[in-house]
Amino acid sequence: MLKHNLGYPRIGIKRELKKACENYWNNKIDCKQLFDIGKNIRQKNWNIQEKCGLDLIPCNDFSFYDHVLDMSFLLGVIPKWYLENPIIHHNNKIDLYFSMARGIQKNGLDIKAMEMTKWFNTNYHYIVPEFKKNQNFFIFYKKIFNEFEEIKKNIKKQPKPVLIGPVSYLFLGKENKKTFHRMDLIENIIPIYVKIIKKLIFQGAKWIQLDEPILGLDLSQKEIEAFQYGYKIITQECSSNINILITSYFDDISENLYLLKDIDIKALHIDLIEDPDQLDIVLNFLKEKKIILSLGIIDGRNIWKNNYVYSIKKIDKTIKILGEQRVMIAPNCSLLHVPLDLNYEINIHKDIKNKMSFARQKIDELNDLYNIIKGNKNILLKNFKILEKTKKSFLIHDKKIQDKIKNIDINNNIKRKNSFNIRKIKQHKNFQLPILPTTTIGSFPQTSEIRSLRKKLKIKKISQKEYDNQLKKFIIDVIRKQEKINLDVLVHGEFERNDMVEFFSEKLKGCLSTDNGWVQSYGSRCVKPPIIYGDISRNGDMTVQWINFAQKNTKKLMKGMLTGPVTILKWSFVRDDQPIYHTAYQIAFAIREEVKSLENSGIKIIQIDEPALREGLPLKRKKWKSYFNWSIKAFRLASSIVKDETQIHTHMCYSEFNDIIEYISDLDADVITIETSRSKMELLNAFSDFSYPNEIGPGVYDIHSPRIPSVKEILDLILKVTNKFPIRNIWINPDCGLKTRKWNEVIKSLINMTKAAKIAREQLKK
């Protein structure tokens, strides 16, 4: 029985990769120093996994920005406007790579970043490949081959190169023109995959992992044909010389098993965390074949200790049917989605910490399961006792909260008093805003000064009063900046907040924040997901103090800023001992109380952000209804308590809306702001085709890139929007919050945005 891993976190225990990339972008280190830091992280990761007893250790799972972008770089899928600019071709191609991810604006060169969206139903963002008709694929970058040579020198165990499979890679991309279907490119891409695999075989590779998470989806006929064609050739050309492992995760693959019927692969990996019920179907399919089954039985997306009793039952059943030689064990997906090492956490109550497991511990759990199978029952007993003890902890269960939720009639608490058309008239009368009102999404740059101030408070170098006085100065300053820029609806900047979810977790009972539980969201952007370990309740006002202070210092409207219940849920590590919708309703009720407090204090516009609503969607369409049933109720439970005159905004970013637009409409937010600039407003088509009835703020500038959009560029996007929606229903705003940007970028970009809005107003009057 082989133990292996699908992928390991690449940020470093102290976020070394984040710091290195940002230092490189700011010209503080050169590319050699950047590459040395990357090499050091990789080697530490390989050594950890080898010491933990893995038999197959992944390589090529490291990335300086994004593994999908790495795949595009490997295959030469580089739009010509990047490739044809010699100014970004130096430094071992790394500048070209980063320009695709971040855009570039220097020496007269101005190129936008490539589109970015969510990796299936996770909070990880990837750079979307852009294909042209008759795309020519070729080996452009040799990272995978270099890292294979590197790992061979550093470990004694068998390295396992990891690649995104050809069908999933094509699926994740988009056509630059709608004159062809990207799956038609399968005949072009497969020869290059064969060439890559054969080169790895020549280097000594015995195993290769081809990730095909597309197998967990409802496949179209073109996707089915592409898979059958692609793997028929790959296996014919390569399987006699290398062990091919096809991995799928995030959902069950039982409905697509037939695609594996006539292809010669060594092993198949399935996700038994997301859908344990598929095991019987898969075993029945494989029992007459020679394929090894890899059981994804360690949760790579949550931080709770594995239940060994449960896992051993799955392993025993598989061994009984297939035999031990045809069984592998692994996490269900890459460990990219969890923090690195629980040993670096010193402030978590032992009752909770004993139940937890980060990436390093999850590798140990694989070894534990192997040893239990080999006869060490003491490990099984110890695991059982730990999990039983935590079930009874007073920290987890609060009967008062449970009773409160049980006594709520959810269906009678999720409706506004009147329809949007009635609310809109009242709001427009009260607010007296111009057409195309301008605003931002919420946060403003969190400078080193602000982060230092927060750290000083944490280690008690300054008092709470000193901290508060400094925050007041920051808030007044950002108000004056917004007034000078001439924004119509202001925000307070969120300087008191470390993260849009973590901030609330620190103020809710039943949640905790970690010291070093960092997870990559995109590029150098890392987040510390809170841990929801128990029943949730609000101890008191969470945001009212600072929003009210801001409102008192301006005559303009100030938005109250909250994170929605679904996003708090989805961007946290959630307790696994009760249905997820129970936890969602508990969070929603806490946010509902905060919304009411904001309204009672005089705040007239309240934004409840739900960027995670789309990413939480199950991959299989048959599961959507159940998900939206509780997720929309949770949002409306949080938002529907206000009067007609109070305007509710929500924000979503980097999501495909075409197939869920009716559900988005059911949220009944007065205004929705969305990311659209990277996609050149393509994402807006879903709202336009649906005739979205409420107000909408399509993002007109990309905040995930350092480049500053021109007035003309923004104006063109605004005018594009006015052709799709009634003018009185349109807001003008950036794609997302401005926390990660620098002030000089923000000020110039927002000035251009307000200038463009003013020009558009004048043009539309004529």
Image (spheres, rainbow, N blue to C red):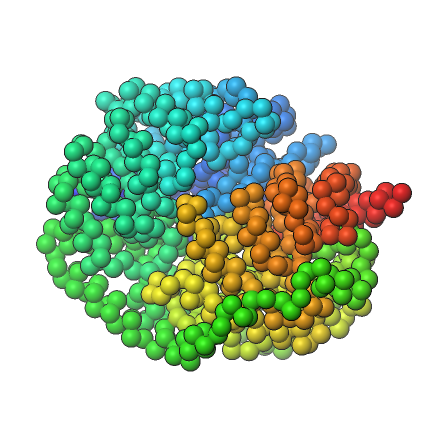
The answer to whether residue 415 is left or right of residue 535 is right
Q: Residue 242: where, in percent of width, then height?
A: 26, 26
Q: Can residue 192 be seen in this view?
A: no
* Placement of the C terminus among the 4 image quadrants: top right
Q: Quadrant of residue 232?
A: top left
Q: Which of 742 and 576 is in front in this view?
A: 576
* Placement of the N terminus among the 4 image quadrants: top left
Q: Residue 281: where, in percent of width, then height?
A: 24, 43
Q: Nearer the viewer, residue 672 or 87?
A: 672
Picture residue at 64% right of the left edge, 54% below the top = 672
Picture residue at 54% right of the left edge, 70% below the top = 412
Q: Residue 447: where, in percent of width, then height?
A: 63, 57
The answer to whether residue 609 is left or right of residue 259 is right
Q: Nearer the viewer, residue 739 or 308?
A: 308
Q: Can residue 683 be seen in this view?
A: yes
Picture residue at 21% right of the left edge, 41% below the top = 283
Q: How many labels sit on residues?
A: 0
Q: Residue 432: where, in percent of width, then height?
A: 82, 62
In the rendered view, would you say 19 is above or below 599? Answer: above
The residue sitting at the bottom extreme is 400
The residue sitting at the right extreme is 766
In the rendered view, would you say 659 is above or below 585? Answer: above
Picture residue at 61% right of the left edge, 59% below the top = 668
